[in-house]
Amino acid sequence: MVELWNDRTVSSILQQILFYSETGLLKKNEARIILRELTELIEYIEEKTENDPKFRLYENELMHLSNDIFFHHPQQSLFAISTNMFGYILIDDDRTCLETRNYFEHQIKKSKSMNTSGNRDRKIFFNTMYGQIESLGGKLS
């Protein structure tokens, strides 16, 4: 599995938590539970990045707000384009999937591997996300 993230990857999640909390659709204690679970998820991903060679995480500073998904298999590929937070358009056209694969491979070449980066770079990357979560937690208190 390969993922492309940046230090703002969790920002859309945090923005939704803040919105629903401010509008009263999410209670503050529920929002804090979600933040705690988000922190646990990020910790899990950080651990996988350090210890699971099958999981490859790249930092790409230029890819923002993309939730597109590309599945590649030699017999059939599938490109899923996010239409909103609940739906995707699925494309299995060979030419489109080939172009998408080339695009992602190009982005990966221009990205920093969090698996092979030094501990310092990896900590800075993940600590940025932890800081964003903590900042929102402070606003909810």
Image: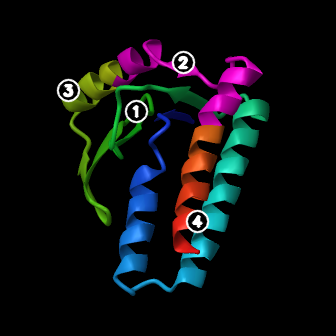
Examine the structure image and report whether residue 38 is included in the region drawn in magenta: no
Q: Which residue is mark 2?
A: 112
Q: Mark 3 or mark 2, which is nearer the start of the sequence?
A: 3
Q: Mark 4 or mark 3, which is nearer the start of the sequence?
A: 3
**Which label is found at residue 137?**
4
Q: Is disc 2 placed on a helix, strand or loop?
A: strand
Distance, label 2 to label 3, CA atoms, is 28 Å
Q: Is disc 3 placed on a helix, strand or loop?
A: helix
Q: Amino acid at mark 1?
A: Gln
Distance, label 2 to label 1, CA atoms, is 29 Å
Q: Where is residue 13, by image quadrant?
A: bottom left
Above/below status of 95 relative to 17: above
Distance, label 3 to label 1, CA atoms, is 13 Å
Q: Which residue is mark 3?
A: 95
Distance, label 3 to label 4, CA atoms, is 45 Å
The residues colored magenta run: 104-126
Disc 2 vs disc 1: which is toward the camera?
2
Horizontal placement of 126 versus 139: left or right? right
